[in-house]
Image: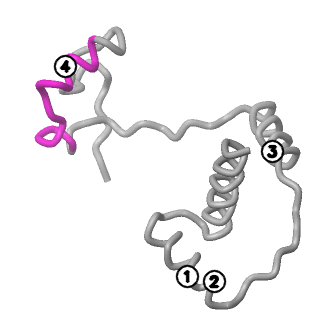
Amino acid sequence: MKKKLSPAKTPLPRLRSDKEAADYFQTHSVADIWDQLPEAEAAKASKAVEKSIRERHTAVKSPISIRLGSEQIAAAKKIAAAKSVGYQTQLRMWIAEGIKRETTRA
């Protein structure tokens, strides 16, 4: 478990802007001080934001049924696993790419 440090004892300089941070990390690495950095608490979205995300997620997608061969499903799962995404997500991406490609042809 990492030891908590007060912000005054952190081994990084105070970076006041994204540009300043980008410039700093172009020439510096945190690899040597990684174990000295304070742990950050996980960000927690507000209930309103969580509700908005859930509503948007369910509103955008409609369930459908499609029959695929077992070899097609196995291949999609293998490819998706190599890309670290779910196979249904991979199938949706392929469908979206095909629709976009066909739309530009028309």
Circle 2 SS class: helix
x and y, in percent, of residue 67 in the image? 81, 81
Q: Identity of the amino acid at label 1?
A: Ala
- Kindly identify which residue carries mark 1: 75
Q: Is residue 76 above or below residue 57?
A: below
Determine crowd level at label 2: few under 14, some 14-19, many 20+ residues with C-alpha closer than 10 A.
Answer: few
Tell me which corner region of the image, top left, top right, bottom left or bottom right, holds residue 65.
bottom right
Frontmost residue, 15 versus 62: 62
Gap in angstroms between the C-alphas marked 2 and 1 = 5 Å
Q: Is residue 26 above or below residue 81?
A: above
First in residue order: circle 3 vs circle 2: 3
Marks 3 & 1, CB-CB < 8 Å contact:
no
Residue at position x 32%, y 35% in the image: 38
Q: Identity of the amino acid at label 2?
A: Gln
Tell me which corner region of the image, top left, top right, bottom left or bottom right, holds residue 70.
bottom right
Determine crowd level at label 3: few under 14, some 14-19, many 20+ residues with C-alpha closer than 10 A.
Answer: few
- Magenta highlight range: 20-34
Residue at position x 81%, y 35% in the image: 52
Determine crowd level at label 1: few under 14, some 14-19, many 20+ residues with C-alpha closer than 10 A.
Answer: few
x and y, in percent, of residue 72 in the image? 63, 83
- Kindly identify which residue carries mark 3: 54
Gap in angstroms between the C-alphas marked 4 and 2 = 48 Å
- The numbered disc on residue 72 is 2
- The numbered disc on residue 24 is 4
First in residue order: circle 3 vs circle 4: 4
**Front position among marks 3 and 1:** 1
First in residue order: circle 1 vs circle 4: 4
**Front position among marks 1 and 4:** 1
Q: Seen in the image, is 9 located left or right of residue 43?
A: left
